[in-house]
Image (cartoon, helix red, strand yellow):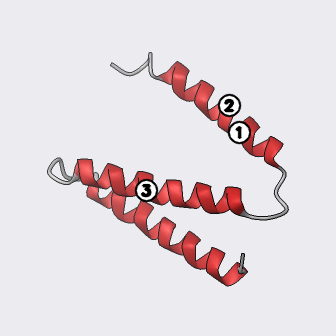
């Protein structure tokens, strides 16, 4: 992929994430903000995984660790 295109997509996904976080400040827009933030993160993850020359074992290790922390922290929230 073209590095310029990759950087452009990263900027778009960062903007989506930031606008989504801003929308979380109001209960009326919190649901939409959560969706917007998760869309931005999903786009960034997909572009990162599609990047050539990447060692996938570290990515999968990070996914496993993050999933484990998320699974354990679900019991903490009430």
Q: Residue at x 60, y 57 (%)?
A: 46
Q: Position of residue 16 (x, y in %)?
A: 41, 65
Q: What element carries label 1?
A: helix
Is residue 69 rendered to the left or right of residue 28? right
Q: Where is residue 35 in the image (x, y as percent from the top left)?
A: 34, 51
Q: Where is residue 58 in the image (x, y as percent from the top left)?
A: 80, 43
Q: What element carries label 3?
A: helix
**Tag of residue 8:** none
Q: Which of 54 and 37 is in front in this view?
A: 54
Of callouts 1 and 3, the N-terminal one: 3
Q: Provide the residue designation for mark 2.
A: 65
Is residue 57 rendered to the left or right of residue 36? right
Q: Which residue is drawn at 31% across and 60% down?
A: 22
Q: How crowded is mark 3: few (under 14 residues within 10 Å), some or many (20 or more)?
A: some
Q: Quadrant of residue 69?
A: top right
Of callouts 3 and 2, the N-terminal one: 3
Q: Provide the residue designation for mark 3.
A: 39
Spot the residue most to the left: 28
Q: Are marks 2 and 1 in contact (CB under 8 Å)?
A: yes
Q: In which quarter of the image is residue 45?
A: bottom right
Measure the alpha-carbon separation of dots 3 and 2: 21 Å
Image quarter hosting the C terminus: top left
Measure the alpha-carbon separation of dots 2 and 1: 5 Å
Spot the residue most to the bottom: 4
**Tag of residue 62:** 1
Q: Nearer the viewer, mark 3 or mark 2?
A: 3
Q: Is mark 2 on a helix, strand or loop?
A: helix
| Vertical placement of residue 8 versus 60, above or below | below
Q: Which of 60 and 26 is in front in this view?
A: 60
């Amino acid at each position: 992929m073209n590095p310029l295109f990759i950087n452009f997509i990263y900027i778009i996904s960062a903007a989506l994430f930031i606008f989504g976080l801003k929308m979380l400040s109001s209960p009326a827009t919190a649901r939409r903000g959560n969706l917007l933030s998760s869309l931005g993160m999903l786009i960034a993850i997909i572009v990162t995984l599609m990047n050539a020359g990447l060692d996938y074992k570290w990515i999968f290790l990070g996914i496993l660790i993050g999933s484990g922390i998320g699974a354990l922290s679900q019991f903490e929230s009430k």
